[in-house]
Amino acid sequence: MTINRRTFGTRMAGAALGLALALSSVALPGPAAAAGFPEKSVTLVVWAGAGGALDTYGRKLAELLEKESGWTVKVDNRPGGSGAVGVSQIMTQPADGYNILVFTGTLTFGIAQGLIPFELKDFRMLRAMQSEPSSLAVLSDSPYRSVGDFVKHMKDNPNGLKVGGHAPGGFHQYMLYQLMKAGGFESGWIPHDASGKVTLALLGKHIDAAMMTPSTGLAQVKSGDIKLLGISTEKRSDFLPDVPTFKELGYDIEGAVWRGIAVKAGTPDDVVDTIQAAVDKVTASEDWKKFQTEQFQDSPDWKEEEFTKRAESDLANQLEFLKANGYAQ
């Protein structure tokens, strides 16, 4: 499969930029007073399609916000444009806290590529609630039984396997890029617009291997239908003790993608404080702790200042990869 990265990026960036310019000319109502917030239903805008890891997280968060704080919460899936569709939905709304973005660490990749025509300063990054590594995944009947098998085949047969994952120029392609550099091989990339589709592509043998979070195919990982050859944690995961790290196999690769929530910049402090207090109740609940364990998720629990600094650092560090693969100038 051939992907014209520059054409894809230019078209998506152009469409998103047009929307951003249109939004800039629209007069939006000012922030509502925080007294009694929330006085109506709150919408969690999930920037991915239904059925993937981000959607699962967003729906559990909605359920527990209702249970723990008595809110009425709706989930609105807005996939597309490497997150641009969901972000633009948030930016069309008042900065009043009633629309909360549910998103991932690929935000910085999208901003760096110009696919998301906004800047970090346009958001208030409220809380990172999940963190999960990437993994090299194959079917259980794959002839590649280890990362070494995979790397050897790719070195002997450049671009010899169909490798895919979620999004063009995102976290998982970045992890593959790191593995390519460490292993000395070349590989193409087949992007999917929802993480759930990656599992389906692997099961249907439309791709030979995937770079994906373990929770993307959690049921299949647990059943043994999907085998994880390596994982991008510093040390072996408590959730996956039998899966070796890339580092222990001799590939100096480490990284994790976070999932969290943000609101539009300009949202009043007292509204943000109310949201943070509600999230505190969620993360303290036994339901949340059980969910995190079942989903193989770490809990960074970065609040606004730490979360913002992490995103700024990610944005700076990802430019080399994006430039090398033609996603950024």
Image: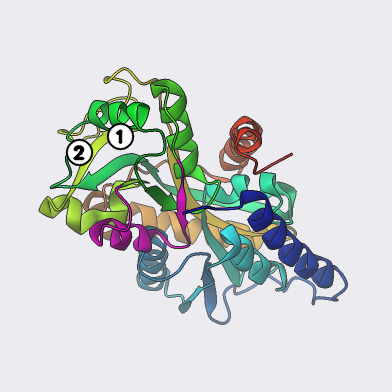
- Image x and y of residue 124, in percent: 65, 53
- Front of the two marks 2 and 1: 1
The residues tagged by marks 2 and 1 sit, at their Cα atoms, a distance apart of 9 Å
**Is 192 colored magenta in this rendering?**
yes
Q: Report the amino acid beneath label 2.
A: Leu
Q: Which residue is outermost to the top?
A: 250
**Is 325 colored magenta in this rendering?**
no
SS category of the residue bearing label 1? strand
Q: Which residue is outermost to the right?
A: 25
Mark 1, Cα crowd under 10 Å, few <14 / some 14-19 / many 20+, is many
- Image x and y of residue 64, in percent: 36, 67
316 vs 28, left or right, is: left
Mark 2, Cα crowd under 10 Å, few <14 / some 14-19 / many 20+, is some
Provide the residue span drawn in magenta: 188-208
Q: Which mark is residue 231?
A: 1
User: Which of the 4 image quadrants contains residue 53?
Assistant: bottom left
Q: Are marks 2 and 1 in contact (CB under 8 Å)?
A: yes
Determine whether 144 is above or below 31 in the image.
Answer: above
Q: Quadrant of the C terminus?
A: top right
The residue depicted at 57 percent of the width and 36 percent of the height is: 310
Q: Which residue is outermost to the front?
A: 157
Q: Which mark is residue 240?
A: 2
Disc on the earlier residue, 2 or 1: 1
Q: Depth check: 160 or 201 in front?
A: 160
Q: Report the amino acid beneath label 1.
A: Ile
The residue depicted at 59 percent of the width and 72 percent of the height is: 37
Determine whether 140 is above or below 17 in the image.
Answer: above
- Image x and y of residue 273, in percent: 59, 57
The residue depicted at 57 percent of the width and 58 percent of the height is: 82
